[in-house]
Image (spheres, helix red, strand yellow):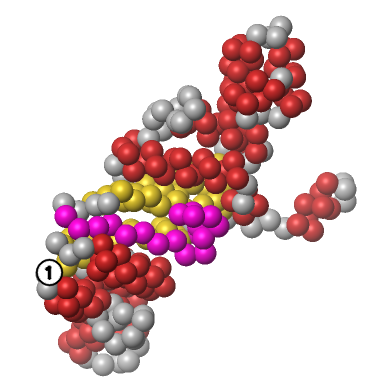
């Protein structure tokens, strides 16, 4: 039973049942547990998983962020789950993953694939868990710097940020600069690196809102259009990272902060890319009526 528990991570009673079903054959018992785990995972797959952890991993000029979701915040504190997210993030970094499909069949440390390990975790932890998204950024020279806000464990938390700095400057310059920029990104939530990168659908939606507000002023159409253009320039400036005002001094645009750091270091520094993953953003959580659930259970 102990050998099977060590190999599968399953509970004692499940291991005993597996061995009973397979006449004590450990290899067959492992397969049986995987089959049962897959069945359990399928049953739980419809549950909304909006909690969990964001992991970050960096290797010099390359960094990856990965979001793994669970149903409750309690699971995010589980060492087994944390270990899985940490290993999965390292795998994503190794494969340069920009989507989770890239790594689902990757070999997981200790045996099996990443998907098989996830399926086993669902069976043993008892909650739906999903690999949601991954992104890798890289520079040819310089450094990728990571930051985790509200860290639950090293490199794991609710907001994970990566900053890519292209430069000949040393780590003594790039690391502290990257950390400050990453903290800004965590707090300011930019939507793109620059105005050209802002999502077109978002821009059109904002333009529609601005046009409705401007029209309420009752001013002529040409004036309304100028008001809309002004609103859109303001929106782009406030939501593109390089034009955002640095949260630390509340006055300097990020682009100027990076340029000044390069001047001070005696070599150019370019902020080429970033990643900001916030746990559960964009996931619609199911709202449950607890009183109604209790009443239904009681047959009221």
Drawn side of residue 67 relative to residue 267, left or right: right
Q: Nearer the viewer, residue 38 or 248?
A: 248
Quick check: 290 above or below 35?
below
Quick check: 295 above or below 175?
above
Q: Residue at x 14, y 77 (%)?
A: 263
Q: Quadrant of residue 174?
A: bottom left
Q: Position of residue 26 (x, y in %)?
A: 63, 13
Q: Position of residue 219 (x, y in %)?
A: 26, 93
Q: Residue at x 14, y 62 (%)?
A: 168
Quick check: 17 above or below 126?
above
Quick check: 218 above or below 53?
below
Q: Residue at x 74, y 27 (%)?
A: 12
Q: Which residues are magenta?
A: 141-158
Q: Position of residue 85 (x, y in %)?
A: 49, 44
Q: Residue at x 32, y 39 (%)?
A: 94
- Element type at mark 1: loop
Q: Quadrant of residue 269?
A: bottom left
Q: Nearer the viewer, residue 224 or 59?
A: 59
Drawn side of residue 163 relative to residue 80, left or right: left
Q: Position of residue 14 (x, y in %)?
A: 72, 24
Q: Mark 1 = which residue? A: 268
Q: Nearer the viewer, residue 125 or 163?
A: 163
Q: Nearer the viewer, residue 202 or 64?
A: 64
Q: Residue furthest left?
A: 267
Image quarter in which the N terminus is found: top right
Q: Decide whether the magenta segment is chiefly helix, strand or loop.
A: strand
């Amino acid at each position: 039973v102990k050998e099977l528990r060590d190999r599968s991570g399953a509970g004692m009673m499940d291991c005993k049942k597996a061995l009973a079903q397979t006449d004590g054959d450990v290899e067959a018992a492992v397969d049986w547990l995987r089959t049962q785990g897959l069945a359990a995972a399928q049953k739980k797959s419809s549950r909304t998983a909006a909690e969990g952890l964001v992991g970050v991993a960096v290797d010099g000029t390359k960094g990856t962020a990965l979001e793994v979701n669970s149903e409750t915040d309690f699971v995010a504190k589980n060492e087994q789950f944390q270990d899985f997210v940490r290993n999965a993030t390292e795998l994503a970094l190794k494969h340069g993953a920009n989507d989770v499909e890239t790594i689902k069949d990757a070999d997981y440390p200790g045996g099996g694939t990443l998907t098989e390990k996830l399926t086993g975790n669902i069976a043993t932890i008892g909650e739906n868990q999903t690999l949601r998204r991954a992104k890798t950024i890289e520079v040819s020279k310089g450094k990728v710097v990571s930051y985790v806000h509200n860290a639950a464990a090293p490199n794991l938390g609710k907001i994970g940020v990566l900053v890519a700095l292209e430069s000949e400057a040393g780590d003594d310059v790039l690391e502290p600069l990257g950390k400050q920029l990453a903290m800004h990104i965590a707090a300011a939530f930019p939507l793109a690196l620059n105005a050209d990168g802002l999502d077109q659908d978002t821009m059109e939606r904002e333009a529609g809102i601005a046009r409705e507000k401007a029209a309420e002023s009752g001013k002529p159409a040409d004036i309304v259009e100028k008001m809309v253009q002004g609103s859109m320039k303001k929106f782009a400036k406030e939501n593109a990272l390089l034009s955002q005002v640095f949260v630390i001094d509340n006055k300097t645009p990020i682009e100027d902060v990076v340029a000044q750091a390069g001047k001070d270091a005696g070599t150019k520094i370019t902020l080429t890319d970033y990643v900001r993953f916030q746990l559960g953003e964009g996931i619609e959580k199911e709202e449950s009526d607890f009183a109604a659930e209790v009443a239904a259970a009681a047959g009221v």
